[in-house]
Amino acid sequence: MPRTPLPTSRPLSRREFIAGSASLAALALGGCTSATPRLARTPVPSEPFELGIASGDPRSDGVVLWTRLAPNPREVGAGMPPESFVVTWAVAEDEAMSRIVRSGTEIADPQWGHSVHAEVGGLRPDRWYWYRFTCGGEVSPTGRTRTLPPAGSSPERLRFAVANCQKWEPGYYTAYEYLVNENPDLVFHLGDYIYEKNSDSDGVRPHGQKEVKTLDDYRIRYGIYKSDPALQAAHAVAPWFVTWDDHEVNNDYAGAVSERLEVTQADFLVRRAAAYQAYYENMPLRRSAIPVGPDLRLHRRFDYGRLARFHILDTRQYRSDQLPGPRMQAFDGVPVDPNLTMLGAEQKSWLFDGLRNSPAAWNGIAQQVLMARIDLREGADALVDVDKWAGYEHERRELLRFFESARIRNPVVLTGDIHENWANELWNDFDRSEPTSVAVEFIATSISSSGDGVDKPVYLEDLLRENPCVKFHNEERGYLVCEVTPRQWRTDFKTVEYVSRRGAPQHTRASFVVESGDPHLHKV
Ligand SMILES: [Fe+2]
């Protein structure tokens, strides 16, 4: 939906925000567990593990284990009494959970939606583990997870999957059923884990809930999505690194600015705080991501030995508002304005530092929105989407030229958001007649959003002719599998034929390799 900015897009200070919201001030002061939790006197309701289990943000010596007690996820309170419950976790070296190496307890507190985030340490690097939870007499499913290789080590290989955009209504998560069989070491989720609105048509499975705006609403929305067995199975197969896009809060929001003109920044930050809290509650994130009011630090990085460093970005929370006017604008009219930021000053300098100091052979950037400049109109004058990096042209040029000037080793950008598969070369200067490719971008299509797709859309030939940086494009649903070795990065585009019915066949529609030291795409 086209949007125009509010007269001022200055984010509120923390003080202004808290002054405007007494209820959230209380929220901001809350901890993950209260100092003296009021432990339940009532027994835990039966089947509290309806949302499954997950693990995430592994390190060499540990990982986060997640669950949320929710016997009735579609109800306010998820069927749990408003009391705290003790949840026990265990980590084992075997799937049968017979050789337990670590165990502990956490408090599932109603203030945090009865979620559990156990930060496990003391594990050995670079190996598989299994884990599960118990609460009362109830036992969760068992999940598999993996620690990262030791710092400074030289892994031979990393295999991971990339997923995003899993709108509930238009289709089934068949892609996740296939992803489970890919045996990934880890999974990236690049956002749109939930969608806050309802579609015009119910699709194959309606949300059964109006647009979500409050903490109770968002909690139920996550409950609906996380009840899907294929999604639960994908979480149970490997640790995930998650980041968000816009729909975890509100379509096309930017910083403190809502999609809708009439919503004040103070009101929007109240909504953002609710959405961010529900996100934290439902994701396998570390305590460093505990939200404080309307703020949640999500950008982070990790090293897979010296093979790969990954930066996981947040391109929504700190960005300047989108340019006024329609989403699609003539590129000539887009200002190259250093005051327009996608990352915000702190995240940008953190990213540049992390790239500059990287010891790794490959530098992955897991983020949300299209980075290549794609011209969506035939002819000389380019038409671009200003919600993407194209609307923040100064910062895009800065980053792409930094790849070149700082001699960053093998940058690879992983993108979501647009429900299409793309393989793009990223050029140091999209205006120059003979640009140099300085990085590559792989865009993972949606798991289900936009419904059934097509392999070759009618505009494909025009798109490829107009954009020589694009080496592949496809409009089906699916995910990526990437396999990285010291010498080569390979990406497979895995798709399913349809999502409006179950049981779709799968295809590998294209595979590309990038050789170390040569930022070009080679079709396999
Ligand atoms: Fe999406």
Image (cartoon, grey):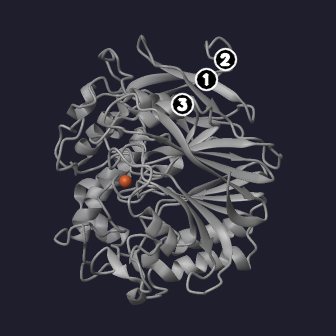
Q: Marks 3 and 2, Cα distance to the nearest angstrom?
A: 18 Å
- The three-letter amino acid code for the residue at tag 2 is Asp
First reached walking from the N terminus: tag 2 or tag 1: 2
Residue at 18% x, 37% y: name it. 208
Quarter where residue 135 is shown? top left
Q: Which residue is mark 1?
A: 130
**Label 2: which secondary element:** loop
First reached walking from the N terminus: tag 3 or tag 2: 2
Some atom of ligand 1 lies within 8 Å of the CB belonging to the residue at label 1 = no
Disc count in the image? 3
Q: Residues within 10 Å of mark 2 (few under 14, many from 20)?
A: some
Nearest to the observer: residue 217 or residue 429: 429
Q: Marks 2 and 1, Cα distance to the nearest angstrom?
A: 6 Å
Nearest to the observer: residue 1 or residue 110: 1
Question: What's the mark number on residue 94?
Answer: 2
**Label 3: which secondary element:** helix
Q: Which residue is mark 3?
A: 180
Residue at 24% x, 36% y: name it. 204
The answer to whether marks 3 and 2 mark residues whose Cβ atoms lie closer than 8 Å is: no
- The three-letter amino acid code for the residue at tag 1 is Trp
Please provide percent x and percent y for residue 147. Answer: 68, 36
**Label 1: which secondary element:** strand
- The three-letter amino acid code for the residue at tag 3 is Val
Please provide percent x and percent y for residue 418. Answer: 41, 58
Residue at 28% x, 77% y: name it. 326
Residue 383 visible, this orientation:
yes
Residue at 40% x, 60% y: name it. 295
